[in-house]
Image (cartoon, helix red, strand yellow):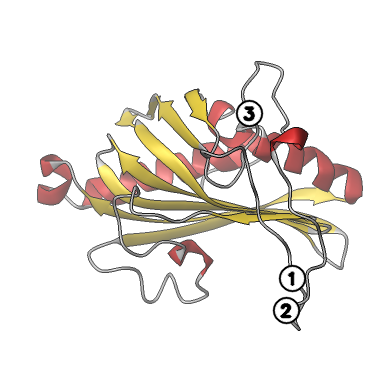
Amino acid sequence: MRRGTFTDDTVDYAAVGATQAADLMGYPPERSKPAEQSVRLGSGEERFRSASETLLSWGAFTGAGLRVGDVRPAAGGGYSGVAFDAEGNPVAPAKTSSDQRFTSEGLPFVAAGTTAHVRGRIEGQRAEAELRVILCSEEPRRVAVALGTVSGSVVSGEEGFFLEWREDDEVWFSVRAFDRPVWIVYRLFPYLVKRRRQALIGAYLRALSPMYATP
């Protein structure tokens, strides 16, 4: 089991971790537009493990046609914290840089505190930003990753990616996000923020599920 969180004042929004909130869609951060979609990936442990590997190796982004570069692990060596049980007792040792994983392209795997530059276009919408991994949690039946904008984006906000291997053996992939317009055009025409987000989420879901069809 691997868990990690990382929050500091380098992200450019206040509601850090809000993609984890159950009421995100009803009560998004101020001036932000929320979004959420899910897709069934299949069933079974093998499908869950394969999808987890894809997600943690930046596959939601690269599979969507975006370029991921300048990946920088957290200062101090990739520490990802200690997991605790309900009573507050540690149940797993801390992970350090000694078990750092890398993609076939040599990029460090997603880990709490990692910063990366993502760039490209999705359906004509600009998708470029410096992103910070503020959450990375690996559990036997669930993987969660959340990234927040640091700089260089036309919006400010957070994206959360969730893989779940449910008790009925089905594997589901969900993306939750909220965006606040930064670029003047998006401030003047807020419907463009929603259009951009729908395009991004659709691309992420297709990256892990080629059978996904945009609603």
Amino acid beneath label 3:
Pro
Query: How far apart are the alpha carbons under marks 2 and 3?
Result: 30 Å
| Residue marked by disc 2 | 88
Give the farthest residue toward the top. Answer: 105
* Gap between marks 3 and 1 measured at Cα: 25 Å
Q: Which residue is mark 1?
A: 84
Q: Residue at x 86, y 68 (%)?
A: 167
Image position of 22 with respect to 135: above or below = below
Q: Earlier in the sequence, mark 3 or mark 1?
A: 1
> At which x and y percent is residue 72?
51, 30
- Whether residues under marks 2 and 3 lie with C-beta atoms below 8 angstroms apart, the answer is no
In the image shown, does 54 or 7 lie closer to the viewer? 7
Please identify the quadrant where the N terminus is shown.
Answer: bottom right
Give the residue type that dot 1 points to.
Phe
Q: Which residue is mark 3?
A: 108
Q: Residue at x 51, y 42 (%)?
A: 202
In this view of the protein, which residue sits in the foreground, 130 or 75? 75
Let me know if residue 163 appears in the view: no
Nearer to the camera, 19 or 71: 71
Element marked by disc 3: loop
Helix, strand or loop for disc 2: loop
Report x, y in % for residue 61. Answer: 53, 32
Q: Amino acid at mark 2?
A: Gly
